[in-house]
Image (spheres, rainbow, N blue to C red):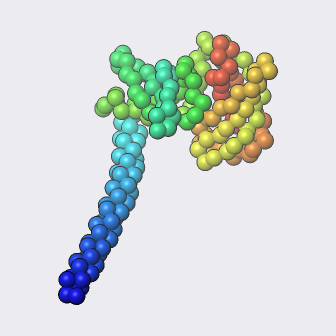
Amino acid sequence: MKNIDIDKKSLKGKVISDIIKVAFACALGVGVFYGGTSFSKYYYNNKYEKIEKNGIVTDCEVIKTGNMKGNYVVTKYYYNDKKYEIREASPAFIEVGEKFKIMVDTTDPNESVILFESPFFYNTDITDVSIGEVTEVLEKRVTYQYSVSGTRFKRIQGIINKKLKVGDTYEVQYLVSNPAIAIIKLP
C-alpha cells in the first residue's frame, strides 16, 4: 500500500513539473515573439530615422521581384557613381522595370528605403493613359483596376494623406511596352 502512495506522489510531482515546463516554454515563446517583433520595429524605426536625417532622394529601378514569406523587390540605384542593389519587402503587383524614388543614407549608401508612394516614369518612357477605378483604400495604399486594349490590370500604389473612396475614378498613366506598369494620378 505504501508503494502505491509513493507512486501517486511521484506521479503528481511529475505532472506539476511537466506543467511548469510547458508554462515556461509558452512564456519563453511569447517573449521571443514579442521581443523579436519589438526589436524589428525598433530597428526599422531607427533605420528610417537615420536615413531620413542623413538621406537624399534619388531614383531606383526594380530588377527582380519575388515572394518568400511575403512579396519583395530587388532594386538598383546609383549614389556617387556607384551602383547599389537592395532587397526590400514590397506591396503586391510590382513589376520588373518599375521606377520609384528611394531615400539613401549618405553615411552608408547600402542603407535605403524605397518610397513606394513615389512611382514615376522618365520623360523618355513612352506612356499612354486609361481610366482607373479605386477598388480598395487602406491607410497607406490604394488598389485600383484599369483596362488597356481589353485586358484588365490590378495595381497597388502607396499613398500619403489622400482622401479616396472605393469607386472613385482617376487617370492612369501606363507604360506602352508593359501596361502592367502604371501610375494612378491622384489629386
- Provide residue 109's location: percent of width, then percent of height: 34, 28
Q: Position of residue 166 (x, y in %)?
A: 75, 44
At x 38%, y 57%, the residue is 34
Q: Nearer the viewer, residue 128 or 79?
A: 128
Q: Is residue 52 left or right of residue 1?
A: right
Does the image show residue 56? no
Which x, y percent locates residue 13?
A: 25, 77
Q: Nearer the viewer, residue 145 or 159?
A: 145
Q: Residue at x 36, y 15 (%)?
A: 81
Q: Position of residue 112 (x, y in %)?
A: 40, 32
**Left or right relative to 68: residue 148:** right
* Foreground of the two, 75 or 187: 75
Is residue 144 something one can see in this rendering?
yes
Q: Quadrant of residue 107?
A: top left
- Return the residue nearer the eye: 27 or 56: 27
Determine the residue positioned at 45% across, 25% down: 74
Q: Quadrant of residue 21?
A: bottom left
Q: Is residue 100 left or right of residue 156?
A: left
Q: Quadrant of the C terminus?
A: top right
